[in-house]
Image (tube, rainbow, N blue to C red):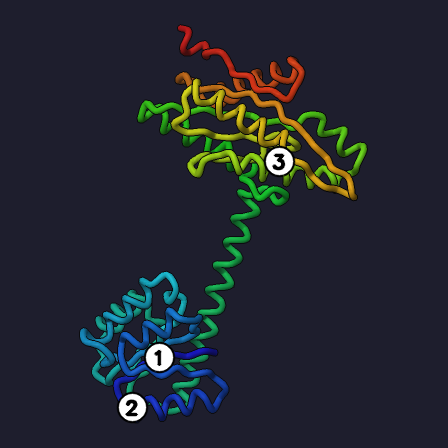
Amino acid sequence: MRVVLAHASAEMRERLGGVLAAVGHEVVAAASAERALEACRSSPIDVTVLDVEVCRGGGTAVLELIKGDIDAYRTAVVLVEHQDLDLDAAVGALRRGVQDFLVEPFTAAELVARVEAAGRTSVLQQELMSQAHRLEGLLFEDPLTGLANRRFILTQLAGMVSAARRHGRPLTVAIIDIDHFKAINDSHGHAAGDRVLAAVTAALRRRLRAEDQLGRLGGEEFLALLPDTSADAAETAAEKLCTEVAATVTRHDGEDLGVTVSIGWASWDGDSPEELLRRADEALYAAKGEGRNRVQGAPASLHRRT
């Protein structure tokens, strides 16, 4: 493990560092709070052994800096305390992120045991965090395209409709469907189809703004959420998406595969998320009926007409 040893005493840094190094740990010695924090920031540190006297305020200042730092917070902190440590001080330190205590005087065996236990706990915490991120990806991300999956993009749609209603701001949704996608799978195989899906995803992302959201509804169908986009701006945005995809070529088995998309869009008129999506879907079918590779806007909703 990589251990930062922050102690005000040079003699203690040498003695404790020698013990940790003897059992195979890489030790970075620090004589000050600033040096300890710098060491934690500069490279991944498993454990910091922090003497309570390293900085003013009983060592709490550097502890809070470590635990509040975006790079350093993962390090497990073992606080070296005096014999007069009381319950309130111990509880307070634990709540600020201390993993364990070493109360002076302590033996070499105690030092090694506490440092290695803290390091194992830190590793387990990081593994749990990584697993949580992986599970989150499975729940919300489409594995092929990396886009939001159907469940998540529809949840985002509901949130955006709620925000549009609350703040009176425009919102447009666009359903995007790859033309003749089944023919690509039938003629060139599903691997080619997957590459086309990835290429179309990249093309759509190039034309969308940072605040827009894109998800895969399923199959060859995508949903784009365009906040603060009026009906006039929506048609221009949809045309740009259509043009970008048409200009994209996917290389597969030495052959260039070009595709187009049809897009149906609808601007929010006070209707529900389901109704807004239904209007965009009807506009999509109208675009396909007109010959594909085109965009079509939905008429105003019944809510607006009444």
Q: Which mark is residue 49?
A: 1
**Hey, what amino acid is under mark 1?**
Val
Q: Mark 1: which secondary structure?
A: strand
**Residue lying farthest top?**
306
Quadrant of the rendered image containing residue 94: bottom left
Q: Distance between the Cα atoms at labels 1 and 3?
A: 52 Å
Q: Residue furthest left?
A: 57
Q: Which mark is residue 10?
A: 2
Dot 2 crowding, Cα within 10 Å, few <14, some 14–19, many 20+? few
**Upstream in sequence: badge 1 or badge 3:** 1
Q: Residue placed at 41% from the left, 29% from the top?
A: 227
Q: Residue 111 in the image: x percent, y percent?
A: 39, 86
Depth check: give the residue in front, 147 or 249: 249
Q: Nearer the viewer, mark 2 or mark 1?
A: 2
Kindly identify the residue that appears in the image at 33 percent across and 88 percent down: 13
Q: In this view, does 107 lie to the left or right of 157?
A: left
Q: Nearer the viewer, mark 1 or mark 3?
A: 3
Question: Which element is circle 3 on?
Answer: helix
Which residue does the image show at 50% across and 54% down from the upper left?
Answer: 132
Judge by depth and name the residue closer to the eye, 31 or 295: 295
- Residue at the location (44% across, 73% down)? 46
Instruction: Give the number of the disc on residue 200.
Output: 3
